[in-house]
Structure formats: C-alpha cells, structure tokens
Image (tube, helix red, strand yellow):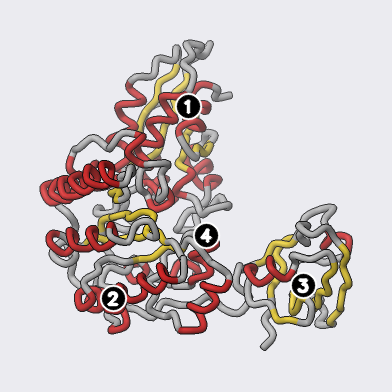
Amino acid sequence: MTYKGIVSAVAPDSLAAELGLVPGDRLLMVNNQPIQDIIDLSFALADEYVEVLIEKTNGEQQLYEIEKDYSEDLGIEFESAVFDKVRQCANNCIFCFVDQMPAGMRETLYIKDDDYRLSFLYGNFITLTNLGPRDMKRIRQLHLSPLFVSIHTTDGPLRAKMLNNERASEINKQLDELMEQGIEFHGQIVLCPGFNDGVALDKTIGDLYARIPSALSLAIVPVGLTRHRDHCYPLQGFTPQQAGEVIDMVDRWQQKCRAEKGTSFVYLGDEFYLSAGRTVPQYDNYDGFPQLENGVGIVRNFIEEWNSQPQSAQGYEISHAIDVVCGHSAAKVLDKLIAQLAIPNLKVRLVEVENHFFGPHITVTGLLTGGDIMTTLAQLPGPRTGVIIPGISLKKGQSVFLDERTPADIEKTVGVPVRTAYFAQDLLQLLREWR
C-alpha cells in the first residue's frame, strides 16, 4: 500500500529546498518502502544515502537520490503526522467533549482521534480500544514510549459502560501488556460524579500505583459539560463539596506516594481546587509538571513564573488603562496577583468573561471564544488604552479562536491595540512595557 505525506512547508536552505520541493508535493516512498507516518520517516531517513519518491503537484512522480549526514533531515513539514489516516475513536463515551460541540464549527474540532502514533508524538490521550496485535507489535518493535492513556477507571465493566464499548473492559490486560513490552505510560481519568469517583476512584488509583514505574503519572480532571448536551448522557458537574472530597482522597494518596515512591504520582486538575476554594499544591508537589498540557498544575506554574519575575517600580508618564481578559476560574487567581501590582500611572482591569458559547459550566480560559470576549468588552465603560487576551484561548500556532474570530476582530470592536499573553511572563511584560 502507498501512503501520501502531503508537504505543508519546506525549510529554507534545507535539503528539500535544494531539491525544489514545494508545499503540495507528496512523499510516497523512501528506499522503495511505503511510509505511513513521520515515525516511519524518521527511521527511514537514518542513513547517509536515501532514495525518496515524490509525487509533484502536477501529478508526476520523481525519484530523488540524496546523500546527507546521518542525522540530517529533509527540512519538510507535513499537513499531518500520519500519512494514511488518523485513527478514529471507536467509543461513544458518556462524557465526550466533542459530542458537546455546537454545529457549524471547523471540521477539525469534530475529529475524535484515538491514534497511538499521535499519543507517542504529541501526548494525545488514547483509550487502547482500537489497538490490534499488529499495533501492539509495532509499539513494541519501535519502542513507542511513553504513551498517554485515557484510563478513567480500572473497573472493567464500569469502563465498558462509560465508553459504551465492550473492548474497554480489557484495560487491565492492555496495561499489563504494555508493561511487559517495556512501554511506559501516563494515565488520565475524566472524573464523573456518581460513576468513577468514590470507591471506584480509590481502586483505580491503587491499581495504577501498583504499576509504577511503568505508570509514570496519573492525572484526574473533572468532566466538562457544555450547554450543547441535548442528546448526550445526563451528567452533573462537581459541587464544591464533592470537589473537596476528591481533593482529600487524592491528598491521602499523594502522601503515601511521596513517602514510598518519592513523587506525588497522582495529580488533580486545577479546577478541583478552584471549585472547592482550596489552595493549589506547592510547586515541588507537581514533580516537574508531567501533565501540564492536561491542565494539571497550570495555576501553580503561573504563580511561580509571576513571582519569579523581577519587580520594577518604573511606570508610565501618562495614564494607561489596560484590560486583562480571562475566564472565571483564572480570575480567582489573577485578581490577587494583579491587586499586588504597583506600577505608576497604570490601571489594570480584570475582565472576567462569561462563556455563553459553551455555557456557564465551562469556566476555563482556554475555551473562551472571540465572540464572548468582544461582547463583554463592548459592554464595559471607561477609558481603555489596550486589551490583553489569553493566548491559551487561541488555536495552537494560529491567531484564531474556537469560533473563528481573531484578535484583529476584537481590535476592531474595541478600537485600541489588542495583544496576546501566553503566560505569566508575557502578561507582566505587556503590563510594564505597553507602548
């Protein structure tokens, strides 16, 4: 079978540029072997002489003979890391966030990927329910480790019910097989009240704890519920009291893990602490933040970065009024930090945006839309020198929100410069050096 890796970009002064490759060209084979993803490609290119078959944009095929350094790559970026097709999810999870997306958004937001290659390459979480013997063999042979596994519960029948897939009940067998093959993994639990919490959660943590050191970390995040759940399984979010009970259970496990293994091992999503009105754990308790991309430890990491920045008393010659945009959860943290700022002639207003697009239960900043930000800012009176928006709300690598609005759209609405802060250092620098 021949796969096609579509070129999206060619680095200047690279081997690919010297060969005249351009975006739209398609990589077909290397050394007369089909290449199904960039994992295959990295192994195929690990030589000083390679033959690369390319299909040009006009449909013609051309074979290139390339002499290069052993570790030198071609300088190509592809539209997708997989050249066949992204492996789709075979489940119908009761908590699936994609099923709660409104209609009419860009197609990529409806993709339910469950691809072990994307798990290895980018840290995407997979359920293992669509893996066959050939997949497991390839994972072992190429040592694709670590993987990121959506476990949710180690109670087989309960997991099958939550994922609506009988194969989901085989999770313990699959984890043991990964361990036998020397594959490490990070685990994730999407916690749903009345399903996999309480006794079931306690058992799951214990079962994963017993799999250390193959199990590297375990993150627990609360189920996200949007207002677009008309045809979804009826679920409720966590009350502050319930969030506190989860924190207490995890805290006991963390104390045990630190005493016996030297790390916390199991970590809670920040929303639990914010909902319960509890202080997030200290920096060292996150052990290097192994699941920061999963929203675990962002608050503590932000506070640490904010506090590590040099303090400056230099202010502005004329008065500045800057709006800082965030969601409800982040406001609980930012409000205290911004209140401590003492920059002459600078007034900072924290703009807490209600998420009308997804609904009031979605309070994280990363899911704010451009439309909701624009509406909120347009309703606020008073002077405004500029607006700082959160980079976490934008599509990775692009200046576009989930609703296809852009920072430029916001700038047109408010009539002042709009700039983006991706984390604490950016935010402080913009506040101190707005020019």
Q: Which residue is mark 4?
A: 122
Residue at mark 3: 25
Image disc number at residue 163: 2
In the rendered structure, the answer to whether residue 95 lies left or right of residue 408 reads left
Closer-to-camera residue (358/319)? 358
- Helix, strand or loop under label 2: helix
At 28% from the left edge and 60% from the top edge, which residue is drawn?
210
Q: Dot 2: few (<14), some (14–19), or many (≥20) neighbours within 10 Å?
A: many
- CA–CA distance between discs 1 and 2? 43 Å
Above or below 184: residue 343: above
Residue 335 falls in which quadrant of the image? top left
Earlier residue among tags 2 and 4: 4
Q: Residue at x 36, y 25 (%)?
A: 338
Q: In the rendered image of this protein, does residue 256 appear above or below residue 72?
A: above
Residue 32 at x, y percent in the picture = 78, 82
Mark 1, mark 4: which one is toward the viewer? Answer: 4
The answer to whether mark 3 and mark 1 are in CB contact below 8 A is no
Sequence-wise first label, 3 or 2? 3
Label 1: few (<14), some (14–19) or many (≥20) C-alpha neighbours in 10 Å? some
Identify residue for label 1: 428
Q: CA distance from mark 2 to mark 4?
A: 23 Å
